[in-house]
Amino acid sequence: MSILKKIHSPADLKRLSPDRFPALCQEIREQIIGAVSNVGGHLASNLGVVELTVALQYLLDTPTDKIVWDTSNQSYTHKLLTGRREQFHTLRQYGGLSGFCKREESEYDTFNAGHAGTGVSAAFGMVEGREQLKQKHKVVCVVGDGAMTAGMTLEGLHHAGGLGKDFLVILNDNQMSISKNVGAISAYLSRTITGEFYGKMREETGQLLGKIPHIGSDMQKLARRAEELAKGVILPGLLFEELGFQYSGPIDGHNFEHLLPTLENVLKMKGPVLLHIITKKGLGYEPAMKNPVWFHACPPFVRETGAPAKKAARPSYTAFAMDTLVKLAREDKRIVAITAAMCEGTGLTAFEKEFPDRLYDVGIAEQHAVTFAAGLAAQGLKPVVAMYATFLQRAYDQVVHDVATQNLPVAFCIDRGGLVAEDGTTHHGAFDYAFLRHVPNMVVMAPKDENELQHMMKTSLEYNGPISVRYPRGVSLGVKMDTAPHTLPIGKGELLKDGTDVAIMAIGVSVWQAMEAAQRLSEEGVSTAVVNGRFVKPLDQELVVDVAKRVRYVVTVEEGCKMGGFGSAVLETLAEAGVSGVRTKVLGLPDWYIEQGPQDLLRERYGLTAEGIYQSVKELLGKAPSEKSQFAGTVHAGHLPHGDEQGS
C-alpha cells in the first residue's frame, strides 16, 4: 500500500510513524525520477533533499512556519508533500506546476526564486516581518553549499547574525552547486572530520583533559576548540560563529536517526542557528549519482539507463559559440574565459580542457565575474564572460560601472537569450536587449543563425570595447557554415529582401521567421522587405531609415521585451529622422513575466512565429486575418528550417 498517496498535506505526514519515513522517501524518489524522466527538470538536487524535506515538514507547522528554499530548484519533495502529488506529472509543463517555488501556486511556497543566493536575505526579511508583527512562527532557510559563493548569502548571514533574532539556516552540503564547487569557501567546508589525523588529535585531547582534575567552563571551551582543531584543523563552524550564528553539525542528511533529533533540538534554540548537513546529490538513482552535473537540470531521459530520451538533431547555438571561441583562443593567447558556476551549461568544458589555465569558474558570483573580467581587460587580456541572459541581470551594475564607464574590451557571450521553455518565469532571457542597449559604449549583437554567430564571436574579440553577442537556447538551424569566422562591420545590418509595401525588421532568431512571413506576403502581392538588424546597438540607422522611406508599414520582431528593446530603437530612429506617413507595429514579449512552456508554443502565443508575423502584418494592412493555415511550422523552398527545439 502506497504511503505517499495517503499524504495530502503535512498534517497527514505528522500522523505517520517516523519508522516509515525511509519507505516514504523511497516512494518519493520513485515519483520524482518517473516524472523528470518524462518531462525533464532538476533531478540530482531534488534526490539529495528528500529526507531533509520530510523531516522539516514533520517537525514544523507549515504553512504557518515558513520554509524558504534557496534557488527552489530542490523543492520537488516539498511539492509532493504539500498537496500537489496528483498534479506532479504536469511539472514544468505549460499550465502545470512550476519547477520552482511559486507563491501563486501554493500557500506553502513562501518565496519565488530561480536564482541562487536569495534565500537567506528573503528568509531573514520574513524573520524581521515576524518580529515587527509580534508573531511567533519559525522561519527556516535551506541553502546549498554552492550558494555560499554568492555574495548575497554572506551579506544576509552577516545581517542576520548581527541582529540576533531566532532564525534557522540549514546548509545543505553536497560539495556541488551546478558544476563542482570552486573557491576558498568550498574548500573550507570540504575539510573532513574523519581520518587518521582526527582520530589522533581526539585521542590526544582526551588524554590531556583526563589529567585535569576539575573541568570548568574554561576547560569546556578548551575542549571545544580542541575538537574544532581535530575537525580538519579549522571547523567550518568557526566561520559562521564569527558571523553571529550558533553552529551545529555536520550531520548525515539522509539518516533520520541523526536528522530528526538534531532538527528538533536546533528548532528550539534561540537566536541565529546554522545546521550543517551532508547530503549526496542524486541519491537513489545511480546515473544521477555518477553524473550529477548532467542530471542537475536534464532533458527527458530513459529511466532504465539515464541516457537522453532524444538526441539533438544538430549542435546547439551554445556549441557553435564555444567551438568558435576555442578556435580563436588557439590563435590569441590573450583570450580568457570566465563563467559563474556554469561551465557545462555555457559550453566551456572544451575550452577548459584545452586551456585549463585560461578558464576561470568563479562560482555563483556573477557580479565578481564581470568586475574580475574588467580587471583582466585592464591588464591587456581579452576576457569573455559566458553567462545565461537571466543571470547577467544580477551583474547589471558591474556591466555599467566597472566595464562600460571605462570602455574596457570585455566580451559577453549571452546564452539562453529569449524564451527558454520549461524553466519559465525566472529564466526567460527577456530583458538583455533593453538593459544593455541604453548603456553607453556597449555594443549589442544577435545573430540570425549559427554561421552569423561565428562571425559575431570573431567580431566580439576584435572589438576594443564592451560588446555582447546573444544567442538562444536550442539547436541550430543547420545552415551552411563559412570556412572561417570573419569580423563584421560594427553597426551594419543586412537587407535580406527588398520591398515597397512592408518592411519587417527583425533581430536574432526571429529573422528567418520574418523571411518566411515575407515570402507568403509577397506571394499574395504584398511587396515585403526584410532587414536583419544584427545590431540592437549601434543600430544601422542609415539602413533602417532608407528602407522605411520606401514602404508604408514597418513591423519589428524580437524575442525580447518590447519595452526599450530592438523595436524601440527602430521607432526612436524613425522619429529622429523625421520619417512620417509610416504605420508601425512592434512584435515582442509583453510587459509581464512569461509563463513556462515549450519554445514553439510560447512563440506562437506571443506572435513570434512566421504565422504570427504574417497575421500581424495583415492586421496592420487593415485586412482581416485569414483563417489559421497549415503555414505555421512548415518550411518553404529556399528558406531555412526552424530546427528541433530539443537542445542543450
Image (tube, rainbow, N blue to C red):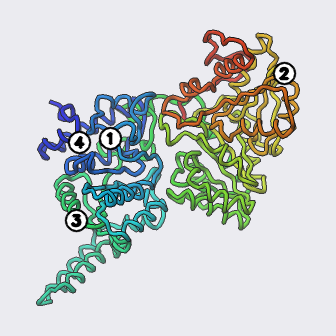
Q: CA distance from mark 2 to mark 4?
A: 64 Å
To which residue does mark 2 refer?
499
Query: SS at mark 3?
Result: loop
Q: Is residue 238 left or right of residue 326?
A: left
- Amino acid at pointer 1: Glu
Q: CA distance from mark 3 to mark 2?
A: 74 Å
Residue 375 lies, with reference to residue 448, above or below; the image says: below
Q: Earlier in the sequence, mark 1 or mark 4?
A: 4
x, y percent for residue 172 = 34, 56
The reply to whether dot 2 and dot 4 touch (C-beta < 8 Å) is no
Quadrant of res 339: bottom right
Question: Which mark is drawn over residue 269?
Answer: 3
Q: Residue at x 54, y 25 (%)?
A: 601
- Amino acid at pointer 4: Cys
Q: Earlier in the sequence, mark 2 or mark 1?
A: 1
x, y percent for residue 64 = 26, 48
Q: Is residue 196 left or right of residue 427?
A: left
Q: Nearer the viewer, residue 421 or 449?
A: 421
x, y percent for residue 206 = 18, 81
To which residue does mark 4 refer?
25
Question: Which mark is drawn over residue 107?
Answer: 1
